[in-house]
Amino acid sequence: GAVVSQHPSWVICKSGTSVKIECRSLDFQATTMFWYRQFPKQSLMLMATSNEGSKATYEQGVEKDKFLINHASLTLSTLTVTSAHPEDSSFYICSAMGRSGEQFFGPGTRLTVL
Amino acid sequence: GESVGLHLPTLSVQEGDNSIINCAYSNSASDYFIWYKQESGKGPQFIIDIRSNMDKRQGQRVTVLLNKTVKHLSLQIAATQPGDSAVYFCAELLSGGYNKLIFGAGTRLAVHP
């Protein structure tokens, strides 16, 4: 149980385009999901907290208009990187919080912006 | 801001030896800590956790020690195996109901045969 999936697992896009990443909790409902970004050889940095049915809460320094988060259901949150640029290339990881408060992590999405 | 950090960025051990990975945290109000293992290109995998009312917790081949006096965590892996090679992160759960995890810098564990 407690499986979280992400789609796609990797994506390559041209500079200026938008990319949508999905995070799904497969066997449980999650009112709260989190989005992290991880640059090579660095740690996970929390970008935002996604709450079902309400606006996401962004961490300081994360542009909400650039990283659009939609948590439309109890099993799905999406992160859209708008007008992507090479500096947005990173490993994006989501987590979904279960009833116990534990976070279950997805496998990550590798974004490369050319 | 406050953060969780690690003393050693890289640790190389021989297969069969015990490994100790250290972590220092700075938020004295945090009451829950987790160790994660991350293999290349994958998401973090839960290893073991500990609450601040405990000093030690044991799992299968792993032990976490918490020293609240000096705000220090350690992860001990017994009889380290090649499959243990990965990056290990400690994480601190911020108090106050935010459920936010703050990750440390990470330590790469390399196990040599």
Image (cartoon, helix red, strand yellow):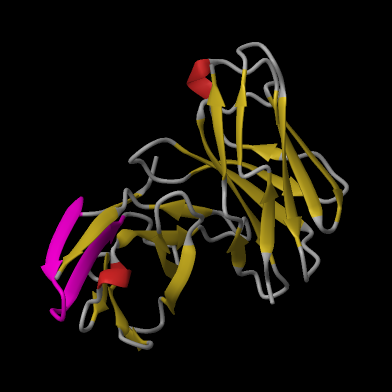
Q: Position of residue A113 (x, y in %)?
A: 55, 21
State whether residue B46 is above or below residue A14. below
Whether residue A112 appears in magenta in the rendering, the answer is no
Q: Residue most toward the top?
A: A16
In this picture, residue A37 sits left or right of residue A5:
left
Q: How many marks?
A: 0
Q: Nearer the viewer, residue A96 or A41?
A: A41
In this picture, residue A97 sits left or right of residue A42:
right
Whether residue B9 appears in magenta in the rendering, the answer is yes
State whether residue A55 is above or below residue B108. above
Tell me which residue sits at (28%, 64%) in the image.
B85
Quadrant in which the N terminus of chain A appears: bottom right
Q: Nearer the viewer, residue B108 or A10?
A: A10
Tell me which residue sits at (26%, 58%) in the image.
B24
The part of the chain drawn in magenta is: B7-25
- In which quadrant of the rendered view does residue B84 lie? bottom left
In this picture, residue A71 sits left or right of residue B57:
right
Tell me which residue sits at (16%, 75%) in the image.
B15
